[in-house]
Amino acid sequence: MTDVLLKEFGITRREAMKRLGALGLIGVASPQVASATASPKATNAKIVIVGGGAGGICVAARLCRAIDNPNITIIEPSSRHVYQAGQTLVGGGIKKASQLVADEADLIPSKAKWIQTSVKFIDPDAQKLDLENGEQVSYDYLILAPGMQNDWDKIEGLTKDDIGRDGIHSIYTLEGSTKTWDMLQEFAKTGGNAYFTHPSTPIKCGGAPKKIMYLTDAYMRRKNSRDKAVLTFCPASKSMFTVPEFDKAIYEQFHARDMKYNMGHDLVKVDKAKKEATFAYEVQKQGDWDELLGEHEIIKTTEYVTQPYDFLHVTPPMSAPDFLKDSKVIYDKGSSGELRMINADQYTLQNPNYPNVFALGDALGTPFCKTGGSVRKQAPVLVQNLLDVIDGKAPSAKFNGYTVCPIITGYGTVMLAEFDYSGKPTPIIPLDPTQERWIWWMLKVYMLEPIYFYGMMKGIM
Ligand SMILES: Cc1cc2nc3c(=O)[nH]c(=O)nc-3n(C[C@H](O)[C@H](O)[C@H](O)COP(=O)(O)OP(=O)(O)OC[C@H]3O[C@@H](n4cnc5c(N)ncnc54)[C@H](O)[C@@H]3O)c2cc1C
């Protein structure tokens, strides 16, 4: 489909690539810290990495370059590695699921050892891990990159098996993204009520639930059936985006496309037989007069609204994987405590209680940063800091919270939302970041997947 689109623009794929290069997009590849060491370091330290997804492989590849004869073990149960950031493109019919999948064995660096099983329990005091296969593994240094799990059953009436049936779909699994594309094409013929949900928990790529809604809108316009459908975004939060500049831009884009929204609406129940979705929302009512404060009390209550749907795109609640939840490496307080996310300093990525434990990726209890783009910037920082600690020094590198979300707003346009812990836009190229642009579409569709597999996963970008 994208090649067809390129023809519509009157240029070839090769020409498009050249233009991207000319734009200096290679800046995407520049690491935040210099290469960890000029010549490989000698150390016998035993480094164990939990998770062989984006973060685990990226860090392993960098460590294998930085250390001479490294002693690195990766624990990862799956033989299939998925480039998850492409799942939105599969849901919109732009890529095939098979294009996003690699054999894990091909990505594990040749100098690292792979144990193909899951971690069951972490004991950071004994520096040991219990594995699902019955083995116990000890470590000198531990790197946690287990990603987040989808908690489908936190929505009453819903299980993972319901995805792709009876109008319920989700790009949050690889198989689900293929089914989303099938259902989207059917929905474009019939029309009806479509809802796109976003839960109250942190999620992988906060923009993705909106991206699939934009693509539904765009696809129906191409098929001249947009007037047959009402598309409504239902996020648990009351804002479209954490960064005000992008928040404002998204509201304007929604209004221009007649895309509706019910802010503060959290999907809590699905009745598959009746095809009804129930949302919880908060209502503030005036209570009794408070003599002391000289004003009325405000009473907050939760109310529920049930809507019939023809097309329900579910973004599941997410959390750190269950095996971490009784471990001492998670936060013990605050909102991250409730979600049991991994405790690590947001700048150095080091656990404050266990200096030999580091973490990166989605399972971190830090603000934002649930993107592959964040992992790419975290990896060199983590490697530098780990090598510092191995040398008996304090961590010297700092991660600035870089987060990138290419918001696909149509077939051919993307708004590239980049920001960091400051909560301000941080565009790599000095162009108005709130504009929808074709060059960012080219980046998203053609450049990021090779950057992922041939750059990030090899530890060179
Ligand atoms: C639909 C969707 C759209 C996205 N869009 C974008 C985008 O446009 N741009 C972007 O930058 N990012 C995007 N992302 C986010 C990006 O994919 C993640 O941020 C990135 O994969 C996080 O890397 P990670 O290593 O933390 O987790 P993952 O890549 O998920 O890897 C975690 C690994 O840990 C393993 N694991 C889990 N439990 C255990 C255990 N008990 N023992 C051992 N191993 C375990 C898993 O099998 C998995 O391989 C998107 C994600 C999704 C789902």
Image (spheres, grey):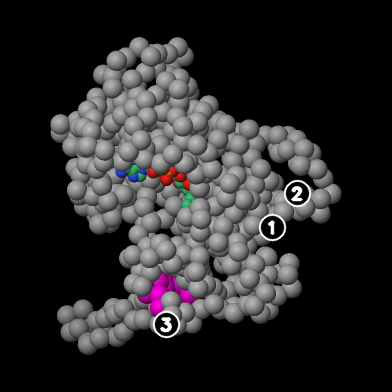
Q: In this view, does 443 lie to the left or right of 405?
A: right
Q: In this view, does 232 lie to the left or right of 395?
A: right
Question: Seen from this angle, which residue lies furthest right?
Answer: 10
Q: Residue 407 location in percent, x, y?
A: 58, 55
Vertical comparison of 218 with 57: above or below: below
Which of pointers 2 and 1 indicates the residue nearer the eye?
2
Q: Name the residue under label 2.
A: 3
Residue at (57, 57) in percent of width and height? 178
Q: Is residue 201 left or right of residue 392?
A: right
Q: Which amino acid does label 2 sit on?
A: Asp
Q: Name the residue under label 1.
A: 411
Contact, mark 2 vs mark 1 (Cβ under 8 Å):
no
In terms of image quadrants, where is residue 214?
Answer: bottom right
Q: Residue 67 location in percent, x, y?
A: 39, 17
Quick check: which quadrant has ligand 1? top left
Mark 1, secondary structure of its residue: loop
Distance between mark 2 and mark 1 Cα atoms: 11 Å
> Which one is nearer the viewer's eye here, 297 or 437?
437
Distance between mark 2 and mark 3 Cα atoms: 42 Å
Residue at (21, 32) in percent of width and height? 136
**Magenta run includes residue 439:** no
Q: Is residue 321 visible?
A: yes
Among the two numbered marks 2 and 1 on one chain, the one whose residue lies closer to the N terminus: 2
Which of pointers 2 and 3 indicates the residue nearer the eye?
2
Distance between mark 3 and mark 1 Cα atoms: 32 Å
Vertical comparison of 234 with 120: above or below: below
The magenta segment is 260-271
In terms of image quadrants, where is residue 318?
Answer: bottom left
Query: Does the residue tagged 2 have its C-beta within 8 Å of any atom of ligand 1?
Result: no
